[in-house]
Every structure is written in C-alpha cells, then in structure tokens.
Image (cartoon, helix red, strand yellow):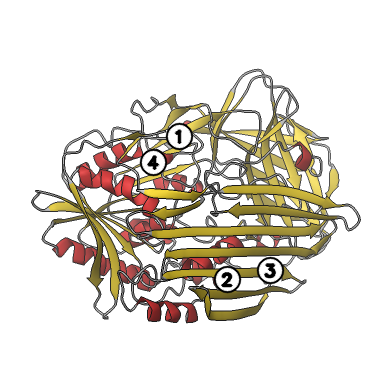
Amino acid sequence: MKDIKTDFEYQVKVIENEWIPLSDGTRLSSRIWLPQNAQKLPAILEYIPYRKNDGTRTRDEPMHGYFSGHGYVCVRVDMRGSGESDGFLYDEYLKQEQDDALEVIEWIAKQQWCDGNVGMMGKSWGGFNSLQVAARRPKHLKAIIVVGFTDDRYNDDIHYKGGCLLNDNFWWGNIMLAYQSRLIDNTIEPNGRAKWIQRLENMPLFPALWLRHSLRDDYWKHGSICEDYDAINIPVFALDGWADSYTNPVFSLMYNLKVPKKAVIGPWAHVYPHDGIPAPSYPFLQDAVKWWDKWLKNRANDTLDAPLIEAYIQEGYKPSSCVDFIKGRYVALQTPNDIEAEHYYLSYNTLQKHKNTISTTVNLCTPQSHGLLGGEWMGAGVLGESPSDQRLDDGMAMIFDSAILQENKDILGFPEFYIQLRSNKTRAMLFVQLSELRSDGSVQRISYGVSNLCHINNHSAIKELKPHETIEAKVKLDACGHTFQKGNRIRISLASTFFPMFFPMPEHATLSLDIHTAQLSLPIFKGKDSALPKQKAESAPLTPLTVLKEGRVDRNISYDILSDTWTCITDGIGGVFGEGVYKFDERDMLVEHNLKRELKIKNDDPLSALYTITQKMKIGRDGQLMDADLIFTQKADKEHFYINGTITVKENDKVIFEKEYNECIKRNGI
C-alpha cells in the first residue's frame, strides 16, 4: 500500500484537453497538470497511445498530480492516431512517432509556463520511446526515466524470444485491435465520429504485421537503442521488477550507456514501482522527484549517491501461481566485477562441480504440453500469472539436480547454458530452466531461456538444421536475483517444447544431447548489501471513479483423455487484468473490456496448436456508447501461419463497422 499525499508545495490545475499542432497540420491531444501561482517551470512529458481520457487515467492522476504538486508541468500526450489525436497509428515505434515527439518537446519548451527544460518518462511503450527520442537528441530534453522498457526490440520484447515466437505476440496484437476500435470522445472532438470510422478503416492487423518479421531485420533494429548506445547523451534512470519481462535490458543499458545513470530492480510486475505488485513496492515518485530536481532544476541532491544497479535479491518461497509479497533484500551492483561465474556440469541426472569426462548421449523429446504451469511471459500484477510448482512440467522434462546446498548461494545476473547436440528434424528449439528444488519436494522456477536452433549463429538469418549433425547451443537465461537456500538443491531442466508461452516449432523433434559437453554458469553475487528503502511509497490522490462491477481473471487447464488434447483458458471478465467495469466520474465515461484466451494442443502434434482470442470492448456514455466484438484465431501448418478473425463495432446498438481478416504468413524458420 502507498500513502496518499495531499499537502503539496503547489496547487494544481488540470487542463483536460490542449491541442498540440504539428507542422503537417496534425493535432495531438494532451492533458496538462499545471502548477498554480508559479513562474516558468520545467515540464515532464509522457507520450503513449493508450488514451489519456479513459485509458491510463487511473494511473495518471496519482503520478502526474504528484510531480505537478512538486513544481513540474506534466504533459500527457496521446500519440498520432490514438485517443482524440488526429491521424492513424500504423505500427509501434515508427519514425513518424519520434518525429512527432520532437515537435511536441519543442512546443512544450516554448509555452509560457515552461522554462525550456523538459524531461520524458514512461512505462512499457513510454519507456521504449523515451529512449528512442533521447537518441534523437532534442535540445530541450534534459533527462529521462524509463520503466519496463527494452533496448532490443527483437530479443527483449513481446514478439520473439531466443528466435522463438511468443504467443503474447498474438495476445498483444489483439489487445491493440480492441484499443484502437474505441470511439473518439465527441465532447472533446466534435468531429470525432468521422475520425473514428476512418481509424477503424485504416487499422492494421497488428499480430500479422509483427509475424511477418520473424528475424532480427532492419524492422526490429529501428528503435533498438542497442544499435548505438552512444546516441543517448542525457541522464537515464531505469527501473523494472523481476516479475516483469523487461529486466534484461536494465543490465545492458547500465553497462553500455556513458551518461549519468542509475537503475533499480525490485520484485514487481509490469507496473509503476510505487504500485509494486508483488510487494514490497518502492518509493518511486519520491526518487523520481529527486531525479527531476537534479537534472531539470539543477538542484544539488543525493540522487546519484546510489549503486549502478540496486537490485532486490529474492528469497525462495513455496511456489504458487498467486504471489503478492516476496521476501528479500536490496544489494548494490557497482560493476560487472561484483559477479563471478560458478560452473556446473551434467552427469546422469546430476548437476555437479566437476566436469564429466565420460561421453554420454541422451535423447530429449518432450510432449507439446510441457510448460502448462509456466505462468505468463509478462507479469501484470494479477493473481494466477506466476509460475506454479514446476513438478508437473519437470516430470515431462529432463532434470539434473545438484547436491544439497550446505550454505545459502546468492545469484544476480544472467545464468548461461552450453551444450552440443543433434536434431532429427530441420527445425527445433531448446528450452532451459533454472529452478530451486526445495526440501519439501516443491520446485520454484528462478529463470529460463530458449533458443531457436535454426538461429544458432544469430537472429538475422535462418540456418535449417541438418538431421543428426552436431551443433553447439548456447542459451542465455533471463537475468534474475535469487538466494538458493541452504538445505535445498539447484535444478536444471531441459526440454524441446514450452507451451503455451511459445507457439510450437513445426516439427516434433528429438534432440540427442551430448551430456558430457554441457556447462551451466551461475552468476554468483559477491558485492555488498544496500539499504532497504526507508520511505513508504507515496502518490497524489487517486482518480475519481465508480466501480460498477468487480472484475476477475479466471484460469483453468483441462485435458481431454480421448483426444490427448490440453486446453488452457484465461478469462478476464470485466477487465483484461481484472480491473472490473468502472466509470470515470469526471468524464462520465464507462469502460469495460473482456478478453478470453483459449489455447489448445495435442501432446504429439505441434501442428494441432490453436489459439483463439475473444474480446468485447465497451466504452462511452448515454447517447455515445460503443461496443466492439472481436474474435481471432491463429494456427499453422508446417510452412505457414493462418490468422483469421472478425471485428464488429456498434454505436448505440447499431452496427457501424464490420471487417473479416484472413492472413497467410510464411513461417520462415519458426
């Protein structure tokens, strides 16, 4: 829980809508928090496509109200083609998006309330584009704060991982379709209905768009800061949590930027840290004010009196899909030298310190249903998304356990796994999982990694496997911070499948593993502890809203014995993340979004995979009420993906837009 602060230095006036004109005649819609009785002040920009009036409004008020109360003008802008803004949103992270942001920053700096100093911040999309815009070096942009971001759009985002296709590519693409189907508020834009219809007609099929780029080509390199870290020349404050999927870039960003910088990694999911779930949360807004004071107001303070990365090393806990608090401690990672590699080797189901010199080959062919209890790729702070006890999945995998640990062992960073192997098929994947085998027999997942073996050289080209030819596989597992407890064991599990997190490879491959060549490297932390945050997280008052119906997210897995088919269902009722049905009191705007995911697969048939997403998006007020029904499926044969679906949009119960989609996309090595 956070403290709600009401006593600020500045009283704040909120401007519900201010049009920002661009040079091509486009207008962007903004919402502004303006401190009163002040001369010119610095400004903070958040620039995303998620609708300021009825999308991110719940989180905007407590955060931007807090910054504004401390003497900052906060400008929350809807990007071109989103919210009430003009134009069309054709894709994520386009050059047009950056170009518009440069004009927005220039416009802000010239306003009578701005002293010419601008900061930029955001989580997820807003974290991505804060880095991308900083790399363009607008003269008025002085510092940024990024949360839940990436510096490599191919390797560390929602579309692909290790060269394998994340099923969240389909999920997120469908959510964007629902988001973009929403009406335009006619109390802000009188011409909103016409703009809304045009937007529906010009909306791309997002999941198909991303599926066409299965390699790390120029499409993904654009907007990936890792292509040129030196392009960024302003201070960067980066944050994320272990329950999120974007912690890897925190390390690479901190190790490669040459500017004033710092980072914090806590236990949270894909949320702002002051709302941190799983707890404990972090006093993010207080830290952020210090950061802005230093770089936007030139005030001397202790914001840089911190380690390069302050990371939360988590204690083990009995594995559960419902985790709301994680014990642990913060440590100070000053340099990569604070981490030492400790090597382990495989032999006859054991993980040992000495290398196995006896040549041993074993075959690995896991059922397609391996991974059923793996949890979500990206945690969003919703119960049920954490990985469950891994005993069931490990029963399908090949496991290797260490001896009982005689003392606690802290790891921080990236575990790595190496092995030589052969495949009997031309396309295959290797999944590697690091877990803690507890003394009670339960298994807690700590980290995992995956490799599309057709990308064995790099992710820019496909090299199909030659059956039974030996290759070297290197798998970099996700960064983690964890204490293995005395009395427990370290476990590595290997598999050739991981569903439903990944869409299966087209062939049911058997991998022949040369166990004597295998090596696991663990990043052992040798540095010092850091003090736990002494302050409780704060925010400004919450957004006024009325909950009309409590939401929930139901999850279940079922098995049809006769057809040997597993079905995984996640059903967000009243809200994708369980938010419920609610009304924003200040806008008199009702919001409801239901999303059901259904994934099916047979144990021995990767081509049986079927993914169905059904959504209802409902939004509006009396006299202007819309609802959109969307249903899409994704399936594949050996050479192609097929995405089929329909969108039906109603206004005041009358159908105003219908469209059917049928896409066939070459698999191209995935």
Left or right of 618 in this view: 639: right
- Determine if residue 371 is in view: no
- Determine if residue 625 is in view: yes
Where residue 382 sits in the image (x, y, percent)? 55, 44
Q: Amino acid at mark 3?
A: Gln
User: Label 1 belongs to which residue?
Assistant: 311
Q: Amino acid at mark 1?
A: Ala
Q: Quadrant of residue 456?
A: bottom right
User: Crowding near pointer 1: few (<14 within 10 Å), some, many (20+)?
Assistant: many
User: Label 4 belongs to which residue?
Assistant: 263
Q: Pointers 1 and 4 in contact (CB under 8 A)?
A: no
Where residue 246 sits in the image (x, y, percent)? 50, 49
Q: Name which of mark 4 and mark 3 comes first in the sequence.
A: 4
Give above or below for 397 relative to 177: above
Q: Amino acid at mark 2?
A: His
Label 2 to label 4, Cα distance in Å? 31 Å
Label 1 to label 2, Cα distance in Å? 34 Å
